[in-house]
Image (tube, coloured by chain):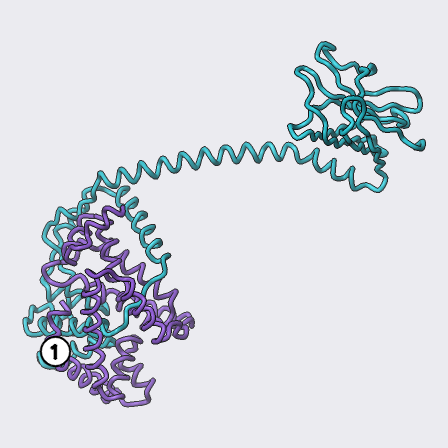
């Protein structure tokens, strides 16, 4: 192949300015630029200026806010990477230096003209990572991680609590939806005429109580739900304390075959009783409901 | 990368900013971004014709400046020159990759919208930045005059090569003209453009 003259190479440089020079010609051109041809290197710089001029002819465009955010995130990631790598930077890279024309030629061969400005300094202390800044950022990130871990532990605890409640809630839901479930309204008695409640039970003797407007129990006292059967038995279903709003719920599975319900009622039981007796409700009845028909 | 850190660079020269980036000062990179992102994004958008892709490449460009800052010689070229060259190169790379995937999209921002964006930008600027924006506007006007002075055919082939990243063979195929004719049109077009810009003393403004 006949060697090209400098005039022909400068024409190639000019053609390459617009882009799209064939790879074979790029290789040939970069080989020539590697010979330190001053005239062709100057032509390359002129071509670079022409490229920039074409870019500067465009109207500026404002980016959306997310562009900067994404960039800063990437920079943060890079800083973290740099921190994890050996510091200072690899000395081989620090000493890397090529004549301007060779660098430009190699860049052209790669399809770019950026090489004209890619001549690194023999040794630049600026390439060393600012350790103080990087460590400060690392500490800040570690703090953030510790806070997130704490939040995660709290969320796990909340989740475990909810999961523990789930079986009871599902049983309650099944009870309330079952067509065989019977409900009985309880009305406020004595000092608590505004209290109101409803008790539900099914054939399997699952029992659910929902109360509203119940006063807070005195210190050491608690409320108890009782059911009375047609056979004359009085059975303690369970004890409970209302929320600050006066609401309360109680779900208990009763023993199978305890008989037919005829009355349900809620009493206030005191601590001095030590333990609520299974068959001996106090006289303080605050809610009561009678089954109208024998079930 | 605080607000205080950013404000310290407001009056700094472009080269000072680049030197600070070489010393791994992220606030300097942020200042470089604020200063040049509209032009970098303009180049990317012109080549890619897709706003989302152009913004992604813009992030890549500034990230590359951060990662490879140590290889930039502040004595040899202006940071703006470097940024715009990197932007064009990366945008063309992405354009070709999208072509391979068959995902090249239509222009999402019209020239009128771009003008509107520029006007809004000019209004939002303070007095100190406004004069530099006016200078940039003057540069744009001069380049446009030089480009518009080209014949329609010459302008078309230059734009296909420069902004669409087509090889000369591809342009030849695209326009159904002999390769030699395309090369001649590009060469003559760029020579005219260079002569026109030289007459306006453009060199100093580029670097």
Q: Is residue B44 visible?
A: no
Which residue does the numbered mark 1 point to in the structure image? B200
Which one of the lettered chains is coloured cyan? A
- Residue B108, horizontal then vertical, whole percent: 40, 72
Q: Residue at x 34, y 50 (%)?
A: A73
- Residue A182, horizontal then vertical, whole percent: 85, 36
Q: Is residue B36 left or right of residue A206?
A: left
Of A187 and B35, nearer the camera is A187
Q: Is residue A179 visible?
A: yes
- Residue A118, horizontal then vertical, whole percent: 16, 61
Pointer 1 chain:
B
Q: Residue at x 15, y 72 (%)?
A: A49
Q: Residue at x 70, y 16 (%)?
A: A221
Of B173 and A212, nearer the camera is A212
Which one of the lettered chains is coloured purple? B
Q: Is residue A65 left or right of residue A13?
A: right
């Amino acid at each position: 192949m006949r060697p090209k003259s400098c005039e022909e190479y400068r024409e190639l440089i000019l053609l390459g300015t617009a882009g799209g020079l064939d790879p074979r010609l790029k290789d040939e051109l970069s080989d020539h630029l590697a010979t330190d041809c001053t005239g062709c290197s100057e032509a390359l710089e002129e071509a670079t200026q022409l490229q920039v001029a074409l870019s500067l002819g465009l109207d500026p465009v404002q980016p959306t806010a997310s562009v900067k955010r994404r960039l800063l995130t990437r920079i943060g990631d890079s800083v973290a990477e740099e921190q994890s790598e050996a510091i200072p930077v690899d000395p081989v890279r620090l000493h890397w230096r090529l004549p301007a024309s060779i660098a430009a030629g190699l860049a052209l061969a790669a399809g770019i003209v950026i090489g004209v400005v890619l001549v690194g300094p023999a040794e630049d202390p600026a390439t060393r990572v600012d350790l103080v800044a990087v460590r400060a950022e690392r500490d800040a990130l570690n703090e953030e991680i510790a806070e997130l871990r704490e939040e995660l532990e709290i969320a796990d605890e909340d989740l475990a609590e909810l999961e523990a409640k789930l079986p009871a809630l599902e049983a309650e839901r099944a009870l309330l939806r079952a067509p065989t479930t019977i409900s009985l309204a309880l009305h406020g008695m004595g000092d608590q005429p505004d209290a109101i409640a409803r008790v539900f039970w099914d054939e399997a003797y699952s029992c659910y109580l929902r109360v509203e407007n119940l006063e807070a129990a005195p210190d050491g006292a608690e409320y108890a739900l009782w059911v009375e059967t047609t056979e004359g038995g009085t059975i303690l279903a369970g004890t409970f304390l209302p929320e600050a709003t006066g609401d309360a719920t109680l779900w208990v599975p009763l023993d199978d075959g305890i008989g037919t319900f005829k009355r349900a009622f809620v009493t206030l039981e005191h601590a001095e009783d030590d333990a609520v007796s299974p068959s001996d409700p106090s006289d303080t009845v605050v809610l009561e409901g009678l089954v109208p028909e024998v079930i | 990368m605080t607000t205080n850190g950013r404000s310290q660079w407001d009056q700094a020269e472009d080269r000072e900013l680049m030197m600070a980036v070489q010393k791994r000062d992220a606030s300097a990179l942020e200042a470089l971004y604020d200063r040049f992102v509209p032009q970098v994004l303009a180049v990317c958008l012109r080549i890619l014709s897709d706003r989302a892709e152009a913004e992604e490449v813009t992030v890549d460009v500034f990230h590359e400046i951060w990662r490879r800052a140590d290889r930039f010689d502040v004595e040899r070229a202006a940071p703006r020159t470097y940024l715009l060259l990197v932007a064009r190169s990366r945008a063309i790379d992405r354009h070709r990759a999208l072509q391979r995937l068959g995902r090249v999209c239509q222009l999402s921002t019209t020239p009128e919208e771009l003008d509107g964006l520029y006007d809004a930008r000019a209004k939002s600027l303070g007095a100190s930045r406004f004069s530099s924006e006016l200078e940039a506007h003057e540069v744009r006007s001069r380049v446009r005059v030089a480009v518009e002075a080209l014949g329609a055919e010459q302008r078309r082939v230059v734009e296909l090569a420069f902004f669409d990243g087509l090889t000369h063979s591809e342009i030849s195929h695209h326009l159904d003209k002999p390769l030699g004719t395309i090369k001649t049109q590009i060469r003559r077009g760029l020579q005219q453009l260079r002569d026109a810009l030289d007459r306006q003393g453009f060199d100093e403004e580029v670097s």
